[in-house]
């Protein structure tokens, strides 16, 4: 416990000592007066005689300690840390089986997600097709993150493994790559306050091994939450004049989430997709915050004064 005005504690000690000394002197004076008047037998020192005044005296230091503004540090749970939103921008994300398109629905859901986050959460944005690119470094400026989400456009293939590696590099502050075959995995440290949220239809077209990248994230304490965008029936998209069929593939997205201790959310339409972001489980951290205890001390002092006064009136017909 700390005090904003510690000098009041010294004053409380002095005043309390003075009040106790004064009470003792007063009792002796009353006892002497009774003895001289021949009423020595009335001079008793029982519980009923002293308890009311003891309660009144006890209220004094309690009240003065309250005036010293005592504070205690308490651990307050809160959502905090870093969230990287990773958007699949492959050509298949232009499919319209989710209105207005898979990517458009993902953008709207992600914007709603960012809007719901407290300032204690830093949000970053990266996009991934054949390669992955960080378009907004993690920031507590959520308006900047929302603006970056709005600039996302579809093109190219899909490399979820590369997206995970770039996200890990952003979190750790250094380039991250998969180890060579037979080589030791890089030591990325431990980052339990970081979460990667992937919006994708799950159709992987190449790049680094996705499961190996997810295992790196798991070893670093980074959880990956995946959101499936699209429908199982799928749709067709036009790429370079060709019509290509595309459908939601949940298997890869589910595996990636499970490897890191995250969860997979699936949404078949735009409304359900927005609702699914409300189920994204960010980690709670605890932060010590000062809690002022003046009110409890004042309440105790008031209780002591009230009890002392009531007992004084009840037993002696007076408060003092």
Image: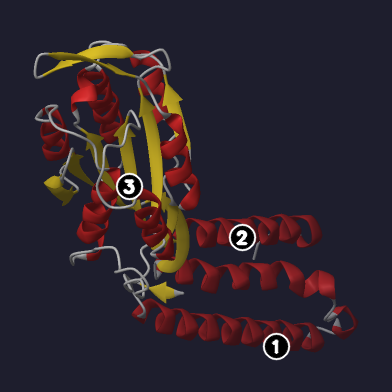
User: Relative to 313, is 114 above or below?
Assistant: above
Compare marks 3 and 1 and give the one earlier in the sequence. 1
| Residue 217 visible in the displayed image | yes
Compare marks 3 and 2 and give the one earlier in the sequence. 3
**Pointer 1 with pointer 2, Cβ within 8 A:** no
Q: Which residue is mark 3?
A: 196
Q: Which residue is mark 1?
A: 28
Q: Mark 1 or mark 2, which is nearer to you?
A: 2
Where's residue 232, x and y in %? 43, 17
| Residue 121 visible in the displayed image | no
Residue placed at 41% from the left, 45% from the top? 282
Which quadrant would the C terminus be assigned to in this image? bottom right
Q: CA separation, marks 3 and 1?
A: 76 Å
Density class for disc 1 (Cα within 10 Å; few <14, some 14-19, many ≥20) is few
Residue placed at 13% from the left, 46% from the top? 133
Residue 95 lies left or right of residue 202; in this view the side is left
Residue placed at 31% from the left, 32% from the top? 200
């Amino acid at each position: 416990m700390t005090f904003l005005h510690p000098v009041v504690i010294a004053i409380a000690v002095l005043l309390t000592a003075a009040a106790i000394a004064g009470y003792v002197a007063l009792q002796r004076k009353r006892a002497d007066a009774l003895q001289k008047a021949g009423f020595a037998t009335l001079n008793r020192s029982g519980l009923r005689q002293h308890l009311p005044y003891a309660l009144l005296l006890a209220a004094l230091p309690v009240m003065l300690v309250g005036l010293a503004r005592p504070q205690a540090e308490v651990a307050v749970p809160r959502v905090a840390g870093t969230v990287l939103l990773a958007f699949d921008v492959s050509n298949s994300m232009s499919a319209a089986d989710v209105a207005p398109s898979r990517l458009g629905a993902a953008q709207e859901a992600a914007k709603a997600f960012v809007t719901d986050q407290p300032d204690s959460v830093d949000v970053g944005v990266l996009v991934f097709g054949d390669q992955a690119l960080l378009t907004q470094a993690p920031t507590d400026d959520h308006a900047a993150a929302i603006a970056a989400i709005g600039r996302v456009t579809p093109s190219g293939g899909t490399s979820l493994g590369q997206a995970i590696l770039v996200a890990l590099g952003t979190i750790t502050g250094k380039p991250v790559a998969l180890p060579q075959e037979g080589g030791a995995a890089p030591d990325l440290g431990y980052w339990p306050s970081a979460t990667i949220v992937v919006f994708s239809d799950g159709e992987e077209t190449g790049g680094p091994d996705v499961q190996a990248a997810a295992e790196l994230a798991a070893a670093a304490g980074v959880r990956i939450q995946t959101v499936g965008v699209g429908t199982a029936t799928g749709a067709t998209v036009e790429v370079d004049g060709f019509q290509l069929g595309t459908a939601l593939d949940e298997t890869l997205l589910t595996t990636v989430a499970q490897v890191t201790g995250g969860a997979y959310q699936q949404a078949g339409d735009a409304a359900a997709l927005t609702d699914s972001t409300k189920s994204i489980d960010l980690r709670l951290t605890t932060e010590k915050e000062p809690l002022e205890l003046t009110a409890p001390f004042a309440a105790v002092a008031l209780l002591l004064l009230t009890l002392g006064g009531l007992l004084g009136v009840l037993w002696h017909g007076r408060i003092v």
